[in-house]
Amino acid sequence: MSATPSGVLRTPLCDLLGIEHPVLQAGMGKSKGLVTSPALVAAVSEAGGLGCLGGTGLDPEELRETIRELRRLTSRPFAVDLLLPAKLAAADQSLERLRALLEREYPAHVRFVERLRERYALPKAQLEREYMVSEPLIRQQVAAVLDERVPVFVAGLGDPTEVVPEAHARGMLVVGIAGSVRNAVRQRAAGVDLVIAQGHEAGGHTGAIASLVLVPQVVDALRPLPVVAAGGIADGRGVAAALVLGAVGVWCGTVFLFAEEAWLDDAHRRQLDAAGAEDLVVSRTYTGKTARVYRNEVVAAWAQSGLEPLPMPLQWALMSDFVAAAEAAGREDLATNPAGQVAGTLRGLRPARQIVAGLVDGARQAIGRLGDYTRTEARRGVP
C-alpha cells in the first residue's frame, strides 16, 4: 500500500478495479427496493471508491433500468450485488401458493405472526407486488446484470461458479463474500477475482467469526488472490487495520447508511442514530438466514416465542405480509433494519463523498502514526 501527501491511498485493489481509493461501498437492498440508491452508488464512485447497487428487491426489468440510470450518473466503475443463496427451501414462485403451504405445514408460525399483527393493531395488508426469492428470479436478475455488462458483480450469498465464466467473457469482474476460511476457499474455487472476508460484526447476512480473526486467516489461505475486509469498519482506523491485516481494501455498509444519499426510512434512521453496539443483534426473524439487525420488538418477540424461524425463503414469505402491514400503518420501526455493530458509534448524516474522504484521510493519518511509532522505537535503539 502507499499513502501520498495528495490524499491518495493506493493498493493493488485500485489497479484491479480502476478506482482511486480502496474503499468499496456495500450493496444493500430490501424486499421493496433499494437502500443503496443510484445517487449513493454514483457519489461513492465519483469520490474515487467503488459504489455498489444492492439489487435484492428489484425485479429484472427494474434492475436493468436502475443500472442504466447509474450509467447516466457516473462514467466510473461500479458494482451490483445480488443474493445467490446456496440453498433455497422448496418454494413456488407464487406467493399465494406459498402462503397456503405455510398454513398447511406451519400453522403455529402463521398463528404467531397473526397474533403479532393483532398486538400492534396493524391492518391486514399484503405486499404491493409479488416478489419471491426463488431460483428463477435469481437467474433473471443475474441475466440482467450480465446483459448490462456491469463492471463488477458481487455475489452477496452463495456460490457464483455458474456466473464467473459468463461474466469474464463479458469483461466483468466477480467478487465473492465469505464468512469463514472454508467459504473463502470455495469462492476461490469458483474463480472469483477477489474475496470479501466479512466478519461477524457486519450488518445483514453475516457469519460467526470476528473480523480480526477472519481477515488474516483468509488472506493467508487465499494468497495471492486479493482479499477485502468487511465488518466493523467505519473510519480510517478501521481501514488502516484492515490493510495491516493483509487486506487490500475495505467493504463498508453501515457507515453509508449515514450518507445523505441513502434511502432509509426515518424510523430506521432514528433507530440507528440512537443505537449502541449491543442493539444490533443476529437474528433469523425476517429472512430465515442469520442477519444482524436492529433489535426491535418483533425480533425480541420471536426470540421469546419458542418457535424456530423457517429457512429462506419460507421465513421471508411468512413475515412479508406482517412487514407490509407495519409499513402501511406507518410502523416502519417494526420492519427489519439491517446494520452492523459499528452503527453504535455513528451519528448524523453526511454526503457520501465526505464519508469516502474521511475513510481515506483517516487511514493515511493512522498509517502515519504507525510510522511515527516505528521511528520513535528506532531512535531508542529498539530492534
Image (cartoon, helix red, strand yellow):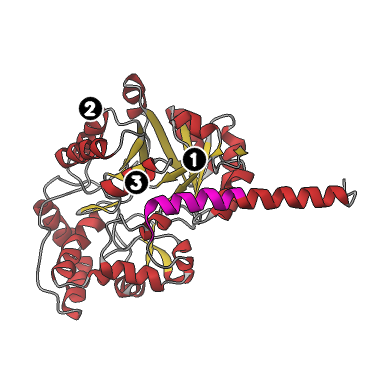
- The picture places residue 237, in percent across and down from the top left corner, at 58, 55
The amino acid type, in three-letter code, at marker 3 is Ala
Label 2 belongs to which residue?
A: 147
Q: Which mark is residue 21?
A: 1
Q: Taking 57 as reference, is 272 above or below it?
A: below
Residue located at (14% from left, 60% from top):
104
Residue located at (24% from left, 29% from top):
148
Front tag of 3 and 2: 3
- Which of the two labelled residues, at mark 3 and mark 1, occupies the earlier sequence position? 1
Label 3 belongs to which residue?
A: 43
Residue 287 visible in the shown view: yes
The amino acid type, in three-letter code, at marker 2 is Asp
- The picture places residue 122, in percent across and down from the top left corner, at 14, 75
Question: Dot 2: what SS?
Answer: helix
Give the quadrant of the N terminus: top right
Q: Nearer the viewer, residue 287 or 226?
A: 226
Residue 211 visible in the shown view: no
Q: Which stretch did the figure color magenta?
A: 350-364
- Which of the two labelled residues, at mark 2 and mark 1, occupies the earlier sequence position? 1
Mark 3 burial class by Cα count in 10 Å: few <14, some 14-19, many 20+: many
Residue located at (30% from left, 31% from top):
150
User: For the residues marked 3 and 2, what is the alpha-carbon distance in whole angstroms?
Assistant: 24 Å
The amino acid type, in three-letter code, at marker 1 is His
Mark 1 burial class by Cα count in 10 Å: few <14, some 14-19, many 20+: many
